Image (spheres, rainbow, N blue to C red):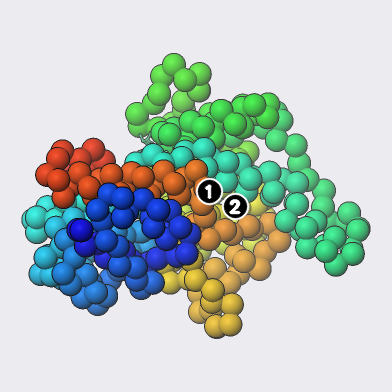
Amino acid sequence: MEKIAFFDTKSYDRTYFDELAPKAGLELTYFENRLTARSAVLAEGCGAVCAFVNDELGEETLTALAERGVRAVALRCAGYNNVDLAAAERLGIRVFRVPAYSPSSVAEHALALLLTLTRKTHRAFTRTRERNFSLEGLVGVNLEGRTVGVVGTGRVGLKFAQMVRALGTRVIAFDPEPKWGAGIEYVRLDELIRRADVISLHCPLTPQTYHMLSRSAFHQTRPGVIIINTSRGALIDSEALLDNVKSGKVGAAGLDVYEEEADVFYEDVSSKVMRDDTLNLLLSQPNVLVTSHQAFLTDEALRAIAETTVGSLRGFFDGERVENEVGARDTQTV
Ligand code: NAI
């Protein structure tokens, strides 16, 4: 059996990996700790580690892993902005990811955030549970006829575009590699930002996309614009977003990701003092809906993630060519 150290484990990970890994000759040791330079010691004696979105795979961690004999990192997610790929290559550590496990799960979550905000069902839910059946303050808006700007028309963005088009919206998009023939009107990013009633982010986090929605971008948006982000938190300057929510320039924001999410998302911190005032203030607004990086969290996606990850690791240990490998030549990360 090949030994794998599995970091940042949640119960739902075990459900799917426990079913598949033993059949593939993989022995998983589960750790609840996030993978950092300090916790890398837990991988002693393992040929590979399995990591997730908020694990820290910078040079220090990778060096600590290499010193303990780790030769592969299997990311059970699509994004790899948390890995220093150049350092991994130098240290002889191979990196695998799960590029497409269920684009629909992420696109449907983005749509759920959008429809919840436009029809205020999150507020209705808490009210009716308290037997408050008043409709005051619950006036919504129709999406039909509005312009939705999709930033990044890869697997998730394309699905999301199809879904919102079915609601009678006009879709405009920006992508440096447009999918011609998909029936989408491509425009420049600055035009999208100026025209869209809804801006939904579906591009990776890179040095080019870092703070794509910056303070100056918010100056250009339409009054009352709705922002949806299921991609990566640092695509948005959170403080600028908060200021624009407070001023009313941003009509609503649905965030499944947040710039500084690493210390709080996926954890129950309800009995602790939360020091991040930007997040505290965003959470306190009635027109901001935050979910805890859960767009991927469906039965179909979790099964697909486990199947691909187990397949990549088995292939690696068997010396086969593994699809889904990322290297230093891939998108530069921040
Ligand atoms: P993908 O790789 O299929 O598509 C990404 C698209 O973004 C590509 O078409 C690419 O050309 C485009 N792009 C690259 N640079 C850009 C730029 N500067 N401006 C605009 N577009 C740009 O990726 P996929 O599967 O569609 O996922 C999209 C993002 O969703 C991922 O990068 C990941 O960060 C995020 N994600 C979030 C999840 C969650 O649970 N919240 C789960 C899975 C992915």
- Tell which circle, 2 or 1, labels the residue nearer the N-terminal end: 2
Which quadrant of the frame does ligand 1 lie within?
top left
Is 275 placed above or below 69 here? below
Any part of residue 138 in sight: yes
Q: Is mark 1 within 8 Å of ligand 1?
A: no
Any part of residue 82 in sight: no
Q: Is mark 2 within 8 Å of ligand 1?
A: no
Percent coordinates x, y for residue 117 in the rendering: 69, 49
Can you name the residue that lies furthest to the front here?
23
Query: Residue sitting at 41 percent across and 43 percent down?
Result: 304
Percent coordinates x, y for residue 324 in the rendering: 26, 41
Percent coordinates x, y for residue 222 in the rendering: 61, 42
Mark 1 surroundings within 10 Å by alpha-carbon count, few (fewer than 14), some (14 through 19), many (20 or more): some
Query: Residue sitting at 68 percent across and 44 percent down?
Result: 115
Q: Which mark is residue 298?
A: 1
Quadrant of the rendered structure where residue 263 is?
bottom left
Is 266 placed above or below 194 here? below
Percent coordinates x, y for residue 317 in the rendering: 16, 50
Tell me the CA gap for discs 2 and 1: 19 Å
Quadrant of the rendered structure where residue 146 is?
top right
Query: Residue sitting at 33 percent across and 44 percent down?
Result: 308
Q: Nearer the viewer, residue 265 or 68?
A: 68
Amino acid carrying label 2: it is Gly
Quadrant that contains the C terminus = bottom left
Can you name the residue that lies furthest to the top here?
181
Q: Nearer the viewer, residue 105 or 80?
A: 105
Q: Nearer the viewer, residue 207 or 215?
A: 207
The residue carrying mark 2 is 254
- Image depth: mark 2 or mark 1 in front: 1
Query: Residue sitting at 14 percent across and 40 percent down?
Result: 320
Q: Is residue 171 left or right of residue 209?
A: right
Mark 2 surroundings within 10 Å by alpha-carbon count, few (fewer than 14), some (14 through 19), many (20 or more): many
